[in-house]
Image (cartoon, helix red, strand yellow):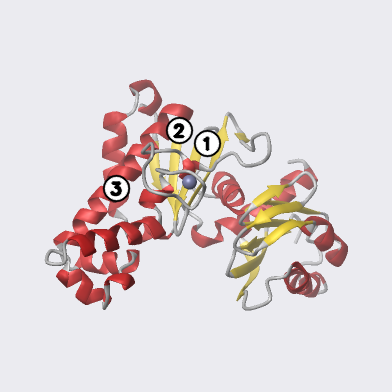
Amino acid sequence: LTGLSIGVDLGGTKVRTAIVDSEGHIVDSDRSLISGHRDPFSITRHISEWVVERLATKADKALCLGVGVAGQIDHARGIVRYAPNLDWKDVPLGAQLQKATGLPTVVVNDVRAATYGEWIHGSARNANNAICLFVGTGIGGGIIADGHLIEGCSNSAGELGHLTLVSGGRQCSCPNRGCLEAYASGWAIAQRAREAASADLVSAQSLIRLAGTIDKIDARVLAEALRSGDTFASNVIDETSQYLAAGITGIVNAFNPCMLILGGGIINGFPEFISRIEAHVHKHSLFAAVAPLKIVTAALGDAAGVVGAATFAKHVFEGN
Ligand SMILES: [Zn+2]
């Protein structure tokens, strides 16, 4: 059992923990919902109890702990600067977990951890230049450039969802308007579909009937309507794929990746996005930037975060 490390993926609503071997395989794992107590003390205790219990048994050779958190992270100091979903500010999570578990601990952003997982053990294995774009409720990303995970000046590089697509466009969840996320994320797709349905009740009638009310139209209902041949849903999804492809064209021109890895709930829900994006991106990107590009789906699914956090920790502490 040598080469084991422990990964944690801490989102706004759930925490996933796993023991991961040096090949990226999950040896043991657990997931639980965060209900009620989101304070750092409760969550740190929950994680450390699971870890300490495992250390006493099969994972006694695990050497380190990596934690991916949805938020802004100062990973040199192990501090969660700001995690809006958890309502945390300046939480010294690394030091607290290190003290509670006895394991050297590193804290990283959750999407960067997932990118690291896809890079070392997933779809981007052996690629020195790769971009991961995760399209779910929000849009996040990670950049592998010339064999390094790009972190930026203050660890926030990779926020590809907040590239401006339309100057002065739709209000984003961030202070900006017109971000890619404001058009193509799960929340934005729902918002755009509800607005379009309100503006054209006749064309949207079968979609509205399927949802129950306009307010209940979301990406899941759109996917269901699309499968039954609904034209209104199909138009919303066509537009969404165009926004995504336009954003990705800019990303490809800027970074010249060998591989673009697409993942997240929206990509899984609308697999047709892949071929549409591929066609658009190959047609509209600079030839030199796009010629070697392969577009593929993420391989690790929702395990990318724990596998990536564990692997990142192993590489930080073991230097390989
Ligand atoms: Zn934004």
Q: Secondary structure at mark 3?
A: helix
Taking the spot 33% from the left edge, 28% from the top edge, the residue there is 285
Query: Quarter holding the N terminus?
Result: bottom right
Taking the spot 27% from the left edge, 65% from the top edge, the residue there is 222
Q: Which residue lies under the disc numbered 1?
A: 127
Whichever of labels 2 and 3 marks the residue nearer the N terminus, that label is: 3
**Could you say where residue 226 lies in the image, as x and y percent from the top left?**
22, 63
Quote the CA–CA distance across marks 3 and 1: 26 Å
Quote the CA–CA distance across marks 2 and 1: 7 Å
Q: Amino acid at mark 2?
A: Cys
User: Tags 2 and 1 in contact by the CB under 8 Å rule?
Assistant: yes
Taking the spot 20% from the left edge, 76% from the top edge, the residue there is 209
Of 195 and 46, nearer the camera is 195
Q: Amino acid at mark 3?
A: Ser
**Could you say where residue 23 lies in the image, as x and y percent from the top left?**
63, 53
Residue 28, above or below 174: below
Assess disc 3: are there few (<14), some (14-19) or many (≥20) residues with their C-alpha within 10 Å of its C-alpha.
Answer: many
**Could you say where residue 207 lies in the image, as x and y percent from the top left?**
21, 69
Relative to 120, is 228 on the left or the right? left
The circle on residue 241 is: 3
Q: Which residue lies under the disc numbered 2?
A: 258
Residue 17, above or below 36: above
**Could you say where residue 219 lies in the image, as x and y percent from the top left?**
33, 64
Q: Amino acid at mark 1?
A: Ala
Whichever of labels 2 and 1 marks the residue nearer the N terminus, that label is: 1
Mark 2 against mark 3, which lies toward the viewer? 3
Q: Secondary structure at mark 2?
A: loop
Quadrant in which residue 216 is drawn: bottom left
Assess disc 2: are there few (<14), some (14-19) or many (≥20) residues with their C-alpha within 10 Å of its C-alpha.
Answer: many
Specify whether residue 24 is in view.
no
Mark 3 against mark 1, which lies toward the viewer? 3
User: Tags 2 and 3 in contact by the CB under 8 Å rule?
Assistant: no
